[in-house]
């Protein structure tokens, strides 16, 4: 069950968007992701890994232990309903098994993936998102590319996503064209109006 449920406010919609960005953007699941899946105790914005099941039973932050989750589609799927409907570009599918298969193939191809999402609009149980992500294409000589895209999300009453519609276009950018270099906070990158 997710922490943020419809109807959304500006604050909870923005947090939902950044939680999804964080979840897809890191090899560890950061605390913001729990606004997408539901919060464990004790996490703060300064912590950057998912606590182990043992740690979730503790009440004092110094005793936290961390469990790395390496872009795990089986974990990510839990932010979606079991029958969630997806359109990703020209692919249409639904349900957890299909989501896991899609994400597994996606991340096998899209190497060194870095993503930024921004709230575009929201209403009641829907959120629209503008996003950019960069990656090296494992199916195209490891060329650096950037995807420009829009998503619209529909949530159930428990705050899980029940529909995800995505449109995106990729452009070759080369090493010199990268915004989201290693060590750069994607949220701090200045994105000009021509790209926004």
Image (cartoon, helix red, strand yellow):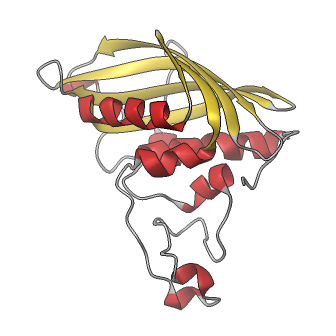
Residue appearing at x 33%, y 12% in the figure: 171
Q: Residue furthest left?
A: 141
Q: Is residue 196 visible?
A: no
Quarter occupied by residue 140: top left
Q: Quadrant of the N terminus?
A: bottom right
Q: Quadrant of the C terminus?
A: top right
Quarter occupied by residue 106: top left
- In the image, 3 versus 104, the foreground residue is 104
Residue 192: give x, y in percent of width and height: 50, 21
Q: In the rendered view, does 114 fall on the left or right side of 196?
A: left
Relative to 190, say whether 11 is above or below.
below
Relative to 93, say whether 57 is above or below.
below
Residue 31: give x, y in percent of width and height: 57, 62
Q: In the rendered view, does 99 fall on the left or right side of 18?
A: left
Residue appearing at x 45%, y 66% in the figure: 49
Quarter occupied by residue 66: bottom left
Q: Is residue 99 visible?
A: yes
Q: In the rendered view, does 129 fall on the left or right side of 5?
A: left
Residue 22: give x, y in percent of width and height: 51, 48
User: Total of numbered circles in the picture?
Assistant: 0
Residue 78: give x, y in percent of width and height: 58, 48
Relative to 73, say whether 173 is above or below.
above
Residue appearing at x 50%, y 12% in the figure: 194
């Amino acid at each position: 069950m997710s922490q943020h449920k419809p109807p959304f406010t500006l604050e909870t919609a923005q947090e939902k968007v950044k939680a999804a960005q964080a979840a897809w953007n890191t090899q560890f699941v950061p605390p913001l992701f729990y606004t997408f899946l539901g919060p464990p105790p004790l996490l703060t914005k300064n912590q950057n890994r998912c606590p182990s099941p043992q740690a979730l039973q503790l009440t004092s932050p110094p005793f936290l232990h961390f469990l790395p989750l390496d872009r795990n589609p089986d974990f990510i799927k839990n932010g979606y309903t079991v029958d969630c409907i997806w359109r990703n570009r020209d692919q249409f599918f639904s349900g957890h098994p299909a989501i896991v298969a899609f994400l597994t193939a996606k991340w096998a191809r899209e190497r060194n993936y870095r993503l930024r999402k921004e709230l575009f609009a929201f209403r009641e149980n829907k959120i629209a998102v503008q996003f950019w992500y960069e990656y090296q294409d494992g199916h195209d000589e490891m060329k650096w590319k950037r995807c420009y895209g829009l998503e619209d999300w529909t949530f159930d009453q428990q705050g899980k996503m029940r529909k995800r519609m995505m449109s995106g276009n990729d452009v070759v950018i080369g090493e010199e064209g990268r915004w989201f270099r290693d060590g750069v906070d994607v949220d701090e990158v200045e994105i000009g109006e021509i790209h926004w």
